[in-house]
């Protein structure tokens, strides 16, 4: 029996496994994909993510391969671009590279990594006691463990089996895009073109490749029917308003699509089980918090479990502490995400906010700091800041 079995080898699962393996615990990571895997979401590493990578001991390796980012260039309808500089360095790195670095670090620390798809959980005596998974050959096997960590992403099977999923609220959005060349030099800035209910985002990965995403509501995607590529290009041209489009761009690899960009839970702990990363709730990727929350959440879950092994009598207290921190932080960040959603959905608000950000750069620095983990997310929701931004 393992001490911990982790479902999912992405940033949250790898961070959790790394923390536990370095503490001497027996950890098994089950990942259904073969690494390095192509995954084009979450290729922006904000301030908090960079700090978390340093704490995990892989920051130096990531910096060797990453592209520095200076800030965000916001382009709302009817206004010139607004440049918001990050208060501290941020990075861009392909997820296939980041994920491999993290999972390799966990394996080097002693975690076992196996290819298998988790399909069920085992349960006995009032707690979850392992997972049931199917390996590459199609063979089903049970992996018993003292703790299970669900780090299997948005739409988490583990979260569903734990009975923690609740219906998502708000607009259902979908992202389409991939890696492209031919967009030219973005000058170290992420560009965000916003319009009513949609946005067009470009994140420079290196001198050639750009991560490009067009995010639209489900009704828009349904209208495109089978002509998704044409619809995506048309929407990008509309939002880009002559500044950017796919006209001279060439896609590198296949187009990707994912969504809906929403997943919500009413808890992240059950006896013997934890959720981490997107499995514990997913926020609009416009805010760029995904990898940061995955790394922090995965490491925090690992530390709570390690403390439990050291003091078994305090298991309930450590689990409750993890859940309280995660749910409280996520609730604030969800509200902050809703504010950002308003700026995407309502052009008048987007123009007003952009004009204020242009005039008062410190507002943008505070907002980016709150989203990126440099300051508490509550600061980004303070009535004084929101009043200066929107009123």
Image (tube, helix red, strand yellow):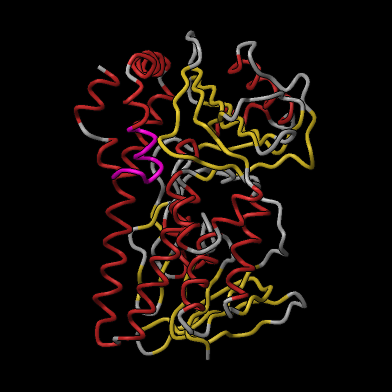
Residue 389 or 374: which is nearer the viewer?
374
Percent of width and height locating residue 55: 45, 61
In the displayed structure, would residue 132 be above or below residue 66? below
Residue drawn at x 32%, y 26% is 363
Quarter assignment of residue 203: top right
> Residue 172 placed where, x, y %?
49, 38
Q: Is residue 227 above or below residue 42?
A: above
Q: Residue at x 53, y 58 (%)?
A: 153
Magenta segment: 366-376
Q: Which sits in the foreground, 227 or 42?
A: 42
Question: Is residue 345 found left or right of 26 in the rendered image?
Answer: left
Residue situated furthest left in the rendering: 384
Measured as percent of width and height from the top left, residue 116 is found at: 66, 73
Q: Judge whether residue 188 is colored magenta.
A: no
Q: Quadrant of residue 227?
A: top right
Q: Residue at x 71, y 52 (%)?
A: 38
* For residue 205, above or below residue 119: above
Answer left or right for 175 relative to 129.
right
The answer to which of 95 and 120 lies nearer the viewer is 95
User: Residue 349 at x, y = what percent?
Assistant: 36, 17
Figure quadrant of residue 106: bottom right
Quadrant for the C terminus, please.
top left
Secondary structure predominantly adopted by residues drawn in magenta: helix
């Amino acid at each position: 029996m393992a001490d911990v079995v982790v479902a999912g080898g992405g940033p949250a699962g790898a961070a959790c496994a790394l923390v536990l393996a370095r503490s001497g615990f027996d950890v098994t990571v089950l990942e259904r994909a073969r690494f390095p895997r192509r995954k084009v979401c979450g290729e922006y590493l904000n301030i908090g993510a960079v700090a978390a990578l340093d704490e995990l001991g892989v920051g130096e390796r990531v910096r060797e391969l990453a592209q520095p980012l200076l800030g965000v260039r916001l382009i709302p309808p009817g206004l010139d671009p607004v440049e918001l500089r990050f208060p501290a360095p941020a990075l861009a790195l392909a997820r296939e590279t980041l994920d491999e670095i993290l999972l390799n670090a966990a394996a080097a620390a002693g975690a076992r990594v196996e290819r298998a798809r988790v399909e069920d959980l085992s349960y006995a005596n009032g707690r979850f006691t392992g997972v049931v998974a199917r390996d590459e050959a199609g063979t089903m096997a049970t992996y018993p463990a003292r703790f299970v960590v669900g780090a299997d992403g948005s739409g988490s099977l583990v979260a569903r089996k734990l009975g923690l999923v609740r219906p998502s609220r708000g607009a259902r959005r979908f992202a389409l895009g991939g890696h492209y060349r031919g967009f030219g030099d973005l000058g170290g800035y992420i560009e965000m073109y916003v319009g009513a209910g949609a946005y067009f985002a470009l994140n420079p990965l290196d001198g050639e490749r750009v991560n490009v995403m067009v995010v639209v509501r489900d009704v828009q995607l349904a209208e495109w029917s089978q002509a998704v590529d044409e619809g995506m290009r048309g929407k990008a041209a509309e939002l880009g308003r002559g500044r950017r489009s796919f006209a001279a761009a060439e896609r590198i690899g296949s187009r990707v699509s994912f969504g809906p960009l929403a997943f919500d839970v009413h808890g992240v702990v059950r006896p013997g089980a934890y959720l981490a990363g997107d499995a514990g709730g997913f926020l609009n990727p416009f805010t760029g918090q995904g990898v940061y929350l995955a790394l922090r959440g995965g490491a925090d879950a690992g530390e709570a479990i390690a403390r439990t092994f050291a003091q078994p009598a305090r298991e309930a207290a450590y689990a409750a502490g993890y859940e309280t921190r995660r749910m409280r932080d996520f609730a604030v960040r969800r509200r902050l995400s809703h504010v950002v959603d308003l700026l995407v959905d309502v052009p008048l608000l987007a123009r007003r906010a952009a004009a204020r950000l242009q005039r008062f750069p410190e507002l943008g620095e505070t907002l980016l700091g709150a989203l990126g983990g440099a300051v508490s997310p509550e600061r980004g929701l303070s009535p004084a800041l929101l009043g200066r931004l929107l009123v």
